[in-house]
Image (spheres, rainbow, N blue to C red):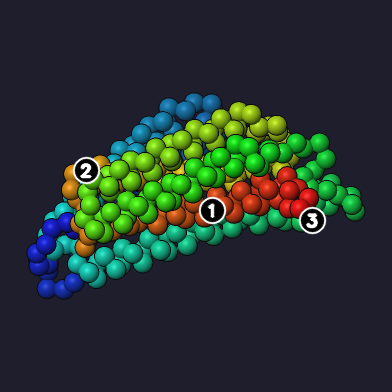
Amino acid sequence: MASNAGGASPYKHPYHLVEPSPWPILSAFAAGAMLFGVIVMAHDGGSWVLGIGGVGLLACMFGWWRDVLKESQIAGLHTPVVRLGLRYGMILFIASEVMFFVAFFWAYFHFALFPEHVSGAERAIWPPAGVKTFDPWDLPFLNTMILLLSGCTVTWAHHALMVDDRKNLVRGLALTVMLGVTFTGLQAWEYTMAPFPLNGGGIYSSTFYLATGFHGFHVVVGTIFLAVCLFRSMAGHFTPERHFGFEAAAWYWHFVDVVWLFLFISIYIFGAGELAHH
């Protein structure tokens, strides 16, 4: 996050030396409790350890990010060098997310282009015989338009921030958050109407739910990210010169948009045989 206040750095160098914090060690213990809880649940069926670890990790996340937001408002801590490092970190994080989704696309096209790996037959088809796919031009197309529109509204908000238009900044972010929530709701509704099961539906079902489900998770994370930026915008935390928190959220949201376009084309359109028909 970028500092909203001016002022010189309190250090004799352009870097930010963070204060001692309890959150790293507490987060490690909470994550360890979650892992132990998964093992306990798998063996005994009890989930209370997993619950305690999950609640603890959420509390650590809240406290840690709260402190980061406070630091961003202290004059001189987030120097240009620090902000550059934050941008590099966000770029590398998004690059790692790209590779995360590459794995799912790789799995999907491995079976889509070579369906004989599924059935063993020489003239196999994709989707596998008996699998009824979604109509890509129905609800999936509507969701695509919603997500693309949200990319436009977050760009509108970014432009408003750059010209110091607070009213349109808040409007653009509020619309983006609303569109993100709408997309998630429609995606969940689509799952309830899926013509193939979540469990035991074969390789097509597995690749479909893994790719679209993880994308949906990223939409939820991005929506929360933008909602925090909305509240920060209403509080006046961002300026045209210093607004890395918003910038990072916008980058992440555009990444989510692009991933969905690839999902829509490859899984919904190609998976339904629409490209072959045309």
Question: Looking at the picture, how far across and down is residue 20, in whole percent?
Answer: 19, 54
Circle 1: element type = helix
Circles 3 and 2, Cβ within 8 Å, touching? The answer is no
Question: Looking at the picture, how far across and down is residue 103, in whole percent?
Answer: 60, 56
Circle 3: element type = loop
- Judge left or right: residue 62 versus residue 113: left
Q: Nearer the viewer, mark 3 or mark 2?
A: 2
Per the image, the residue denoted by label 3 is: 114
- 247 or 85, which is in the foreground? 247
Q: Is residue 251 visible?
A: yes
Mark drawn on residue 234:
2
Tell me the distance, in whole angstroms, between the alpha carbons under discs 3 and 1: 23 Å
Residue pictured at 31% horizontal, 57% vertical: 159
Residue pictured at 21% horizontal, 63% vertical: 241
Q: Is residue 4 above or below residue 274?
A: below
Amino acid type at mark 1: Val
Circles 3 and 1, Cβ within 8 Å, touching? The answer is no
Q: Quadrant of the N terminus?
A: bottom left
Question: Looking at the picture, how far across and down is residue 259, in whole percent?
Answer: 54, 53
Residue pictured at 49% horizontal, 42% vertical: 146
Per the image, the residue denoted by label 1 is: 259
- Whichever of labels 3 and 1 marks the residue nearer the N terminus, that label is 3
Residue pictured at 73% horizontal, 53% vertical: 275
Disc 2: CA contacts within 10 A as few (<14), some (14-19) or many (>=20): some
